Image (tube, rainbow, N blue to C red):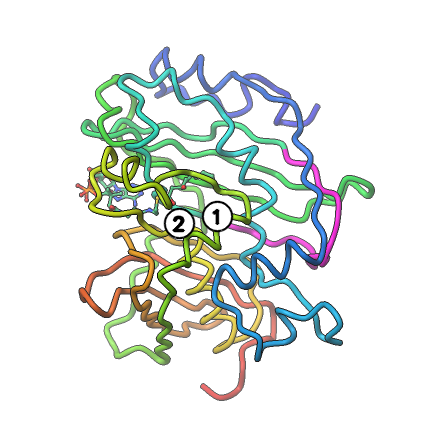
Amino acid sequence: MSSFKDPNAFADPEDSKLVAEAKKVTSEPEEYTYTERDVILYNLGIGATEKELQWTYEGDDQFAVLPTFGVVPQFAASSGLPLDWLPNYNPAKLLHGEQYLSIKAPIPTSGELVNEARLLEVLDKGKAAAVTTIVETRDKHTGKVIFENQSTMFIRGAGGFGGKRSGNDRGAASAANAPPKRSPDAVVEEKTSPSQAALYRLSGDSNPLHILPEFAAIGGFDKPILHGLCFMGIAGKHVLKTFGPYKDIKVRFAGVVYPGETIVTEMWKEGSKVIFSAKVKERNATVLAAGAATLVDGAAKAKL
Ligand SMILES: CCCCCCC[C@@H](O)CC(=O)SCCNC(=O)CCNC(=O)[C@H](O)C(C)(C)COP(=O)(O)OP(=O)(O)OC[C@H]1O[C@@H](n2cnc3c(N)ncnc32)[C@H](O)[C@@H]1OP(=O)(O)O
């Protein structure tokens, strides 16, 4: 039996009864079909340009999807798991906390995929709940696993339910990835557009937090904020352009980005790993921390 069908697959003896029951919920596999058009829309959404034809023109010999696209097919399955069992749950108070993506096979530029999603870990941070989902994404026809995602949602005001506070070691998905003390080996800067969130949301995350001022206000923000997966994608593009392809990537969303701000990604190459963080130039605020990507064997670009 697939572990996604076993109600106790992700049981943890330290979980409270409330959490143990929530973790037993299994859902039906969710399909995701996409075309080259969706690939171009995603690539544009994380800042690819008309000069980068390999990412924006389906007729290009090298036409490809940017690797962080791997977070997209699973999005509906992951964010569809019920959270209303949490005390004081308010979707406007939900922020994306962390993301881990493992790319297990070449990413097709179109396809039919199937996602299976479960709750993996639920932490009680007192003032907030930190809820991590796990999703396995397979090719619908071959059954081959293409992606694994682990997504942590940080839900402000929904803590205090008596669960455990600290998580288990989940390997690369929970690694602290502290940057080395030396100056970064590479820095890439990219200004986002004021319309960045309006464009990125067309790849599947229609959360009003990113477009509707009234909803953003309930969440505690003066104006709509950028999707975490959008600025993770932008930083992931910087890693790809600087060091080449990678097989996994992990970040912690450490601060919010407003559409129109400039993302500055700082990168350190440590063996086959690229450790990175990102800040917003205009406010000198860290927005991505604990970032790392594992390069595909032998792929590290020679220039550094
Ligand atoms: C893929 C599908 C599922 C995803 C659905 C997502 C839907 C999307 O539409 C939503 C979004 O894209 S929101 C935009 C992206 N996210 C953000 O902008 C969040 C930015 N981060 C913050 O604001 C703060 O770091 C904040 C608020 C997160 C934390 O700041 P503080 O409240 O000041 O926390 P702090 O006091 O420093 O720490 C308290 C405890 O929480 C842990 N923690 C901190 N940041 C975390 C984070 N980002 N993720 C997970 N855990 C986090 C700390 O370690 C600490 O734990 P402990 O007390 O046990 O040490």
**Picture coordinates of residue 155, whole percent (x, y):** 30, 31
Is 4 one of the magenta-colored residues?
no
15 vs 259: above or below: above
281 vs 224: above or below: below
**Numbered label attached to residue 201:** 1
**Picture coordinates of residue 267, whole percent (x, y):** 37, 72
Q: Quadrant of residue 193?
A: bottom left
**Picture coordinates of residue 172, whole percent (x, y):** 45, 51
Say if disc 1 is inside 8 Å of ligand 1: no
Quarter containing the C terminus? bottom left
User: Helix, strand or loop at disc 1?
Assistant: helix
Along the viewing direction, whichever of 222 and 301 lies nearer the viewer? 222
Q: Residue at x 52, y 34 (%)?
A: 78
Residue with the mark numbered 2: 227
Q: Are marks 2 and 1 in contact (CB under 8 Å)?
A: yes
Which stretch did the figure color magenta? 100-115
68 vs 83: above or below: below
Pair 2/1: label in front? 1
Residue type of the residue flagged with mark 1: Arg
Q: CA distance from mark 2 to mark 1?
A: 8 Å
Say if disc 2 is inside 8 Å of ligand 1: yes
Residue type of the residue flagged with mark 2: His
